[in-house]
Image (cartoon, grey):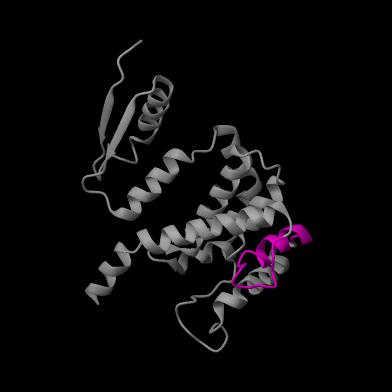
Amino acid sequence: MAERQILFIVIDDDNYHHSFSIIYKIVIYCSQHHHKMLIIFPQVQGDECSLFIERLFMRLKPEEEERLNRILAPIRNDERVQRMKNYIQHGSISTYQHVENVTRLSYWLNCRLHLGADERVLSIGAFLHDYYLYDWHKKSDSNKMHGFTHAKIACENAKKHFNIGKRTQEVIEKHMWPLNMSKIPVSREAWIVCLADKWISTKETLFCRAKVRAVAEQV
């Protein structure tokens, strides 16, 4: 039996994105040959490190990426959807990046756990679940109850702009359970997005705040 080894991978802040495909192959090699691996990020921000690790170990297969892109291309390219890039969701993460993160995790869970969800309903519902199109950090009479109301607003916008069906509407309307206690998810698509949103939101809130603090200190 070959001797087990510990591989140390040092990733600096200049080349870690370019090294991604190489590192992914090393991860696969280590798992197949039972080697231990330690990835070191000496100068990478916590949010970048977290997103990198998530992308590394929750990687979609090329054919999965192709299917997901085919489903979402008309929505991603819509100028109204692009407006989500102008609003911060959690920490330093825009609403657009947040829904992208939730969509990818939802899709990954469905594929890896063989949950049998409808890929189109799941992907579109996840991508439009926060399609409310305003900055919730700027308090006003219309959004002071944002946590309780934004799912309904997002659903109304999605129906008006993309003519989504009932099952996709449920994914959007019920993603804030249990805060919205009466909106209990029923379909597997709604449950997947609801849970994926909780995980992503917690991660973004806890680990993606460095850039926001830096900007605040400069003002």
Is residue 175 highlighted in magenta? Answer: yes
Most extreme residue toward the front is 1
- Please tell me which residue lies in front, 85 or 126: 126
Quarter of the rendering containing residue 190: bottom right
In magenta, the rendered stretch is: 164-185
The residue that appears at 66% across and 47% down in the rendered structure is: 71
Most extreme residue toward the top is 1
Most extreme residue toward the bottom is 141
Is residue 52 highlighted in magenta? Answer: no
- Please tell me which residue lies in front, 215 or 150: 150
166 vs 181: above or below: above
The residue that appears at 26% across and 67% down in the rendered structure is: 214
The residue that appears at 49% across and 76% down in the rendered structure is: 136
Looking at the image, can residue 77 be seen?
Answer: no
Q: Which percent across, then down, holds residue 199?
A: 50, 56
Q: Which percent across, then down, holds residue 154?
A: 63, 69
Quarter of the rendering containing residue 162: bottom right
Q: Which percent across, then down, holds residue 174?
A: 67, 65
Q: Main secondary structure of the magenta part?
A: loop
192 vs 153: above or below: above
- Please tell me which residue lies in front, 78 or 45: 45
Looking at the image, can residue 160 be seen?
Answer: yes
- Left or right, 75 with reference to 41: right
Q: Which percent across, then down, holds residue 6?
A: 27, 26
Q: How many marks?
A: 0
The quadrant of the image that shows the N terminus is top left
The quadrant of the image that shows the C terminus is bottom left
The residue that appears at 31% across and 54% down in the rendered structure is: 46
